[in-house]
Amino acid sequence: MCTYLAKRGSTYYFRRAIPVELRPAFGGRAEFMLSLRSKDRAEAKLRIPAHTVETDKLLADATRSLAGKPAPKPKAPLSPAQMERARTRWEQEQEQADHVADELFATDMEAEALSPIMDALSAGKEPEGSLADIARAGRLLVEHERETAGADREALLNSLHVRFGQNARASKGQNQAVECSDDAKAIEGKGKYLDTDILDGWAAERKPSPRGKDAYWRDAKLFNSMMGRKSVELITKADVMAYKRKLIADPARSQVNVRDRLAYLRTLLEWAAQEDIVPVNVARDVKMAVTERGEKRKDFSTDDLNALFAGPVHAKGERPKGGYGEAVYWMPLLALFMGARREEIGQLRVQDVKPVAYIDDDDKRQEVWCIDITDTPDDDALPNQIKNEASNRLVPLHPKLIELGFIDYVQKLPDQTGRVFPGLKAVGIGKKLTDKVGQWFSRYKQDCGIEDRAKVFHSFRHTWKTHAVDAGIPERVCRQFQGHEGKDAADKYGAAPSMRVMVAAIASYRVPGLVIPKP
């Protein structure tokens, strides 16, 4: 047994009780709870001694500071209702990261659908599309430019402040070269800052994608530009409420945009509270009600799918310019028949496509081809990133994919140590392999006659779920295929569905009326 080692979700923590008589010196806290910032037990154990020495010193200091003072009365134990509230709050905190990840993904999907218009607007060319699409694409560009400009402006002011002192920031009646509103005034503090210490600590633990971390950084900078950069322990609920009012007052921001800005701030402050950098998350209850009706992603109909697969890529063997290679052929098929996310498919390595043994209903040993969707260490030669812990999964391939020649394609790749789709290259802030393929698909599906902007590459995932339910595949098995977390406490008990069950389930999946030309 490893002393002081605890685990929350997939991350290990240093956990040590504070003696009752010393708790007044720590604001009544009952224990030290510090993230070890590792999902590996052996690595986490190596970091415990340093925290042990640190907390020994803190306890010794507390003992000296309380020497001679009367012993405090012990706190009454928590009632069942208080324990239940504490448990509920913890679960909500853990769900917050997933919520924000979903929001980022939804934003990506909208940008993917409108990317041809946004590219045209950025280049000063006349865009093609409906007036509504052009207006929405323009709004997204304006939002991005405003947030980026605010972040850049705050970074400039802070750099001047560091170099030349407080006088570098202009005040009323003074004739400085740089002007700054009272709202953007820097406030000194002895703590840690939202856009540096808090962001870096949160990112080290949660390990978001580069795009995700950049989004949080821009939001931290946006808060600073509106409310003034101050050490995080000086941020008050009044600051957060004022920030919310300023966001709402901006006519360029939708309700959803305001909700997301508050969600990002809330996540960073929640991490700071969990790490005891601040006593409480002052943004926890500051939320934005959304009454606007957003456009939901739609399934592809059978007619849509037949139109896609009758297009030049699948029917004539054509490949677009850009070096995407066979990814444009196989990725839509894998998404439709496996329900996987776009990036999960694009980052598959040859070693992730493999035969797996299992025992069938007749107690006979069988083998089935599977894809292993998993993350990799940061220093891996072919790094993979997944959405969350539930996204790690080993799932059997649909027989139709094998019939169409997917295994033959993988086995004939020249580099058997590389990726399944070697033509894909990581680009942009997020370093995603499939961003450009997503943009290509948005144009290609229009060429195939699918104009509905609510139907994008992610619609394959929706379509898979619809036909899986129609096939009678149980919800628990559907979640395993798609890498979704359970919806209630009962889902957290027991192992994942067996390979025998998964093989039977995927064999039952079909899309009635679907026609796919032979390659």
Image: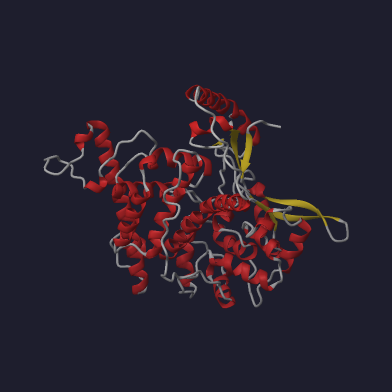
Does 62 sit left or right of 390 as displayed? left
Q: Is residue 502 above or below residue 11?
A: below
Does 139 sit left or right of 385 as displayed? left
Q: How many marks?
A: 0
Out of 377 and 355, give the one closest to the viewer.
377
Q: Is residue 129 above or below residue 486?
A: below
Picture residue at 61% right of the left edge, 66% below the top:
336
Please provide percent x and percent y for residue 227: 30, 48
Colour approach in the figure: secondary structure
Please provide percent x and percent y for residue 283: 42, 51
Which quadrant holds the C terminus? bottom right
Which quadrant holds the N terminus? top right
Please provide percent x and percent y for residue 385: 55, 48
Out of 270 and 250, give the one closest to the viewer.
270
Please provide percent x and percent y for residue 402: 70, 61
- The answer to whether any part of residue 35 appears in the image is no
Does 207 sit left or right of 339 as displayed? left
- The answer to whether any part of residue 516 appears in the image is yes
Residue 443, by quadrant, is bottom left
Picture residue at 65% right of the left edge, 36% below the top:
41
Residue furthest front in the image: 70
Does 275 sit left or right of 116 as displayed? right
